Image: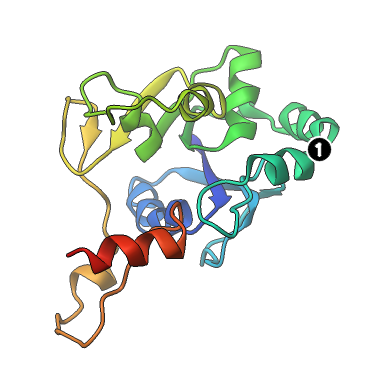
Amino acid sequence: MRILYAIQGTGNGHLSRARDVIPAILKHNVSLDLLVSGIQADIKLPYPIKYQLKGLSFIFGKKGGVDVWKTYYKANSMRLQKEIKSIPVEDYDLIINDFEPVTAWACKLKNIPCYSFSHQAAVLSKLVPKPKKTDRMGKWILNNYAPTSHQFGLHFKPYEPNIYTPIIRNDIRSASISKGEHYTVYLPSYSDEKLVKLLNLT
């Protein structure tokens, strides 16, 4: 069986998860090709990447969250279209997509099944709790950035049969726990000022 595992290369979460997903896939004696698209990640995969693409990266702003204008400015629609057309998705028996737009759109345009396996897939579920205020732009991006035919999500709770709990790296699970003199907060979607103000309230 030939599998293409397409991974979002913006931020570190998708690549970090892939480090544990890849060996789990390889246990099944399959042929696995990796595709990474995106330009803003600090993590490297310890596996050969067959397709390294620029894709359509989100550019993070200095105040947290995605900078929509910088993202639009950096996007090159002609290059993106070429990348979408160049990926031979029809050569694979299974395509697993972790919020990666190039293979998602290649599959959509060629009417080939594509299986998303991501937190974003879980957020799209009607059974997952939503904020009181709807972010229309965010919802539009979730629905159209990397559209897939089948969704398997990752969330803090299994809100439905196709949603699973998060994948936590083995080295994190086996780490010894200690109480230090600081708190580590990893919330790049929020500005430092907002986080400091919020944490000072508690």
* 166, above or below 183, in the image: above
In this view, the residue in front, 139 or 153, is 139
Furthest toward the bottom, the residue is 181
Instruction: Find disc 1 in the rendering and name its residue.
Output: 76
In this view, the residue in front, 5 or 188, is 188
x and y percentages locating residue 20 in the rendered image: 35, 57
Residue that appears at 60% across and 33% down:
101
Q: Is residue 156 left or right of residue 50?
A: left
Q: Which quadrant would the C terminus be assigned to in this image?
A: bottom left
* 157, above or below 184, in the image: above
The reply to whether residue 118 is in sight is: no
x and y percentages locating residue 127 in the rendered image: 20, 21
Q: Which coloring applies here? A: rainbow
Q: Which quadrant of the structure image shows residue 165?
A: top left
Q: Is residue 102 left or right of residue 159?
A: right
x and y percentages locating residue 135 in the rendered image: 43, 28
Q: For mark 1, give the secondary structure.
A: loop
Q: Is residue 42 left or right of residue 180?
A: right
* 175, above or below 199, in the image: below
Residue kind at label 1, given as amino acid type? Asn
Furthest toward the top, the residue is 111
Crowd band around label 1 with a 10 angstrom C-alpha radius: few (<14), some (14–19), many (20+): few
